[in-house]
Amino acid sequence: MSSAFSLSQPFDVLVIGAGAAGLYTALCLPPFLQVGLITKEPLSLSASGWAQGGIAAVIDPQDSIDLHVQDTLRAGAGLCDRAAVQFLVEHASSCIKNLVDLGVGFDRHAGQLALTLEAAHSRRRVLHAADTTGRAVVSTLAARVLQRDNIQVIQAFTLDLWLDPSDGHCRGVSLLYENQVFWVEAGAVILATGGGGQVFAQTTNPALSTGDGVAIAYRAGAILRDLEFVQFHPTALTKPGAPHFLISEAVRGEGAHLVDDRGYRFAFDYHPAGELAPRDVVSRAIFNHLQKTSTDPAHAHIWLDLRPIPQTTIQHRFPNIIQVCQQWGIDVFQEPIPVTPAAHYWMGGIATDLCNRTSIAGLYAVGETASTGVHGANRLASNSLLECLVFGAQFGDSTKFNIQNSGVIPNPQSPIPNPCSTVNQKPEISFSPEELARIEKLRQELPRLVWQSAGICRETAQMEGAIAQVEQWREDFARLPISQILQTLVPESSPWLQTAEEGRSLRTWAETRNLLDIALLILKSANFRTESRGGHFRSDYPQTDPGWQVHTLVQQDCRSQTPHLWTATVDQ
């Protein structure tokens, strides 16, 4: 990594985000390009680094490309684009080889890469690095990035895209760096900002997962796809101050019980298999039980009791769960674990093609931020890290990625014209105590509202009420004096903030703005789709409707500043 840089000089490429997708993309870009890697936190704090799951790839001779494709299509509930899935699976093994060459220490058995079987996979094809695969991948990639002279790592917060007003081409970004707003130019911008789990009151995502890439792309007029599809994990550790650590479903497979505060095994009230029902069924059982029994369901929990499992089995099978729970004062041999369902992975995102191009020229997206068509309505376990790698690798192919003539995917019958913005120069920034209090209150209230209305179970009345509330909050937020200034900055202005505290306040403002945007987009998309499919369940439309085997597309109408939704066929 170069030790000195100037934000006033243009980069060839800006990569926004430093999880697995951003890091691998930066490494795959040709070394003659000057790359700015923008990360809003130190490299080790991405959601990828939290990933306990593995990476799926066809390596075993007993496995096949076709089987992995079929497993992925089946999990995606009719909304996977077959060409994208085929592309992902066919390129998996080469990416795994590259990770091994880079130094990722995958588990081995008898000298060969060890493969495990995971839910919904028909063969053993999942590689692990113990139960911290994401951390192993991200730490290895980060170390390699820091060795590259052409990659400059910049800890900054990206505020918005910078579009050329004459043709809508993406020229760069505006960002907050060391208490000053900069406009940084680049030949191409690649969004790799991860998911948006923080819009929900319960999430396994880290605090930085505020949907930044999707929100800034939406405001710039990019087409988004399938935002209603969110995967929820049924059992995440919930304890004040603790991260929402996933408690593996294998624990219930070994005999752990789900109980409420009275010790009652309520899961059998919802499915004959009780705790061993499918993941989405168990999540809904917990959600519905808490709605009935808790005064504050958005922050309530039930209990996962491991004591029915023999102690020797727990010690052998779940050492990391034991360790993490001990860290937070829970002895799994003596007491149950407080758990709750939590938003885990966002299948939707910025619509892209196989070359990662978006509907805006010069703008690309990769990883969880993107909607490549791979995951459909529900992600197959261990395909998400793989997607980061396979699609990130495409940036190394100069025939697919040309910063002098950045491509743009066709606008699929979009009724919305390219956005054009009018801006006024207002360089001074300061926050009043009243504004800070209002922003903080929104950060508390918004995730609770979205969890209740667009979480595990959804229905029309609650969603319409939530949409009205979020629209009102967005209007109130836009009327704040600080918003009037920040939303009308021009590239010629680079205002300073007087203190580091004000810099942190600006980041909070920007993240809140992004969360308000993605909250509205998720709610609108979920209300639009009148069926249940994959990660989208509606209690008022509980069945899958063949007529809804289509993608949901959404784009901002620049005239009304509101989302416009329509549908597009699935690539079969």
Image: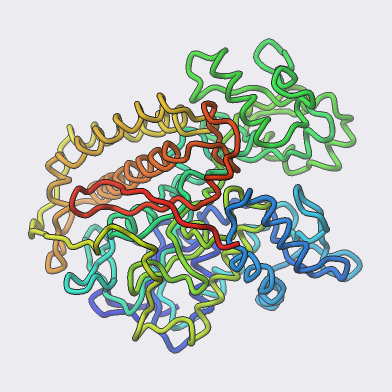
Name the residue rendered at 31%, 49% in the picture. Answer: 564
Residue 347's spot in the image, x, y percent? Answer: 53, 51
Residue at the image position 19 percent from the left and 35 percent from the top: 476
Q: State the quadrant of the C terminus.
A: bottom right
Give percent across and percent down for residue 454. 46, 33
Q: Is residue 442 above or below residue 186?
A: above
Instruction: From this view, report whether residue 28 is shown above or below residue 541.
Output: below
Side (left or right) of 244 relative to 443: right
Can residue 158 be seen?
A: no
Q: Is residue 68 left or right of residue 36?
A: right
Task: Name the colour scheme.
Answer: rainbow
- Give above or below for 99 relative to 532: below
Q: Quadrant of the N terminus?
A: bottom left
Residue farthest toward the bottom in the current orientation of the protein: 32
198, above or below 88, in the image: above
Q: Quadrant of residue 480?
A: top left
Q: Could you say where residue 297 lies in the image, as x and y percent from the top left?
A: 51, 21
- Residue 245 location in percent, x, y? 62, 40
- In the displayed image of the protein, which residue is found farthest to the front? 547
Quarter of the figure with residue 343: top right
| Residue closer to the observer: 90 or 36 | 90
Q: Quick one: which residue is furthest to the top in this view?
A: 262
User: What residue sits 17% from the left and 42% below the top?
Assistant: 431
Q: Residue at x 8, y 56 (%)?
A: 426
